[in-house]
Amino acid sequence: MATDLGELLVPYMPTVRVPRTGDRVFKSECTFSFDTPESEGGLYVCMNTFLGFGREHVERHYRKTGQSVYMHLKRHVKEKATGAAGGAIPRRRNGKVFLDLELNRDFNGEDYEYEDEAKLVIFPDHFEIPLPNIEELPALVTIACDAVLNASSAYKKQEPESWEEEIQVSRHARSLRQLDNGVRIPPSGWKCQKCEMRENLWLNLTDGAVLCGKWFFDGSGGNGHALEHYRETNHPLAVKLDTITPDGADVYSFEEEEAVLDPHISEHLAHFGIDMVQMQKRTENGHHTDNSSRLRASEWEVIQESGMKLKAVFGSGYTGIKNLGNSCYLSTVMQVLFNIPDFQRMYVGNLQRIFDYSPLDPSQDFATQMAKLGHGLLSGQYSKPPMKSELIEQVMKEEHKVLNGHQQKGVSPRMLKSLVSRGHPEFSSNRQQDAHEFLLHIINLVERNSAGSENPSDVFRFLVEERIQCCQSRRVRYTQRVDYCIQLPAPIEAATNREELLAYEAKLKDAEENMQAPPEPVKARIPFTACLQAFTEPDNVPDFWSSALQAKSAGVKTSRFASFPEYLILQVKKFTFGVDWVPKKLDLVIDVPDFLDLSRMRATGLQAGEEELPDLMPPIVLPEDTRDNSMGSLDSPEIDEAAVMQLAEMGFPLEACRKAVYYTGNMGPEMAFNWIIAHMEEPDFAEPLTLPSMIDPGPSTSDSPMGATPLGNSPPEESISILTSMGFPRTHSIQALKATNNNLERALDWIFTHPELEESDALSDMADTEPNDNAFSNANSHSDSTLSPDRDTSGPRVKDGPGRYELFAFISHMGASTMNGHYVCHIKKEGRWVIYNDHKVCLSERPPKDLGYVYFYHRLSSC
């Protein structure tokens, strides 16, 4: 028999591999479905790629790759036999478990036992070889089988415990030198000291500099000024500003090039006026806990409808999602998205095509993993009601109180979470995150992965018209930008129970002074109309430069809808920082309506009697120490020679390195390296640096005052080079910069929302030397739902229509901060509200619409 098995396996021996260090073995879940070894058909693991496949998907992999040898894994879950006294018969617990898989927590370990079974299966004849079979199998096959059986599952290392173990204490934490320069950091209003970035900001713990982080693959991040500052000063540690809580903060070591722990973070932050000790006291003893905890307890009960006898629902569209540990933010967002027809059509309607054309590693393909989750939620395969016999059995065991939740296991989003969070500093962790930020992150990924095909996120996209007025000259400028969400302010001053709030604050103060129990908490009741009014009110524009005055001036900005989306996302701005740096959630309720008419908020464009601001940009101000050099030696541009040598040491031609550093604006070797990768196939790659025209400004004209730049001119070459170094076409980069007044950050967003532009469109736009401020004006004159590219191929894709909406879903948050707590969502399906609370899906008795955080409206059809 041993000879027969050896001969049988000989043709397949070259395809059998032993897992090496770094190989991931997917033996806990199918890459196309949520089948596991506990599923009826078990799981098949390819002995070459170590990918896992359910019974209905393994044939596809065999046909596509020709791989014939698979290990079939099957886990049998059995109820323990009971003795005469009714108790389980004592036996060695889970004695036949040999797969390195988690035990299913849906089954009580005291009442159930597990048996694992493994065998080799050879396709296409399905010849089976039971394992272990050491004596009869070739040595290589035996070693490979043992390695697969003993390997950890692919995502086991992502558990929260192991995440904490990965972060080490920085070697600089104890001896960190802090400058006594008088810097004090306010609790809000931060921006990068070298650019206008207001997100992804890092506080250097040595000198208090607030600077932006690096640019990430998803378009978020910054311009790398924090890293640049480290290279200039060697100040090693920085803390991310929006992560500071009483429990700690995210600290990064530039010198160690990794996230680190700082045991002395409290003292280091106190040096800059951030008192974490006081934050902790407030959270434990004062206003924050005794009253907020009571508010939160009530909030948790109301939002989760804890006091209600909720009826579980099963079937298509009623499948829950397992919580991986602080992953409820992902679950709620995905539940809402897959209740939108466009997402259903894109990923579930095209399921077979997506699966058939998936890459060799489907676990790393965005469309495949979105289709997998969508099918899992909508197919009903993983949300089946209990059998009648099971109901009777549960009643006999007097466990009917937990029957509704017992059969709802949900699907695990582990594979999708690993993919969409890769490379992102926040979502790749196992900490709680902001559901709204994750929603925008997913929309961004959908945009990037839908180039040349149907884009379901089109339903959220709309145009915002921004009107900026110079307060001194009274002249105006109209611009339009793409957006996906409206952030509604929550004006506490507009609360209808203001007197009650003032009385509560007075009673609370008296209770704290007299060491008495706090009064019953009171939430602010804010009308929804007040939130809309606050959104439409003029905002001051920081650092506004008036082209009419050729100087900085006071400016105000108002925003209106230039188009209305098919699906409208409203986020209530509930989270803020107190003056004492305590992150807090505003305790309020808003009477959010079921029906919404925003028609009066449609943009009107330039009005009669209004005078536009001149199309001029602010003058470029050079630092004092470089101004003389730049004016005196135009033929020798400033180049960071250290960065050049660092690239040259990698083996790239010296002249190519010089060009890379120059065209990326001396922003460091990392950005220059990206430029090299993008341009190394060009014929003049290694040619010496030559500037297209050696900066001959010529005489100034009356139309262009000294130092000001007409907006119609070509964008700065440095900005173009930065975008092209990221892999974007030059014409597309120029068009993006022109459309965004040469704002690099907005240009990146513009590129991601215009992936479908043809070369001819770009060239046509380049031929137009005047900026087209009215590129989106046609969107305002159509009441029917229309896709913009059909009218104007140079504009973004928007589906304009009436501004009348109906509420169909909302996501609610429980807890004091987005960095902790829990999310659930309510969705209106078939005329009834349903609550999705992780794996539990039930009919809602009293949907708490006034406590939501993110609201979703769908457009009502025209009458």
Image: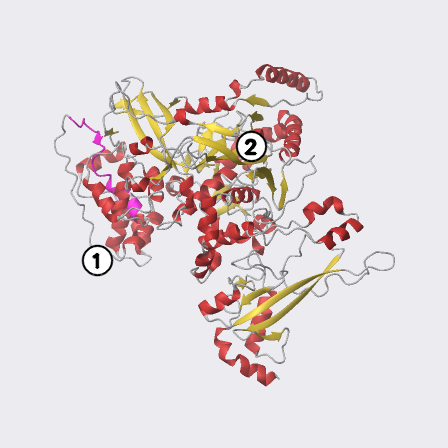
Residue 546, image x and y in percent? 28, 23
- Tell me where the magenta segment starts and ends, as one range: 703-724
- Is 677 on the left or on the right of 804, as rendered? left
Crowding at label 2, few (<14), some or many (≥20) Cα neighbours within 10 Å?
Answer: many
Q: Which mark, residue 852?
A: 2
Residue lying at 56% horizontally and 45% vertically, measured from the top left: 327
Q: Considering depth in this image, is 810 or 299 the residue closer to the camera?
A: 810
Above or below, 154 against 304 in this view is: below
Question: In which quadrant of the rendered image does the C terminus lie?
Answer: top left
- Is 746 on the left or on the right of 761, as rendered? right
Mark 2 or mark 1: which comes first in sequence?
A: 1
Residue type at tag 2 = Gly
Q: Quadrant of residue 648?
A: bottom left
Residue 179, image x and y in percent? 45, 33
Q: CA distance from mark 2 to mark 1?
A: 57 Å
Residue type at tag 1 = Pro
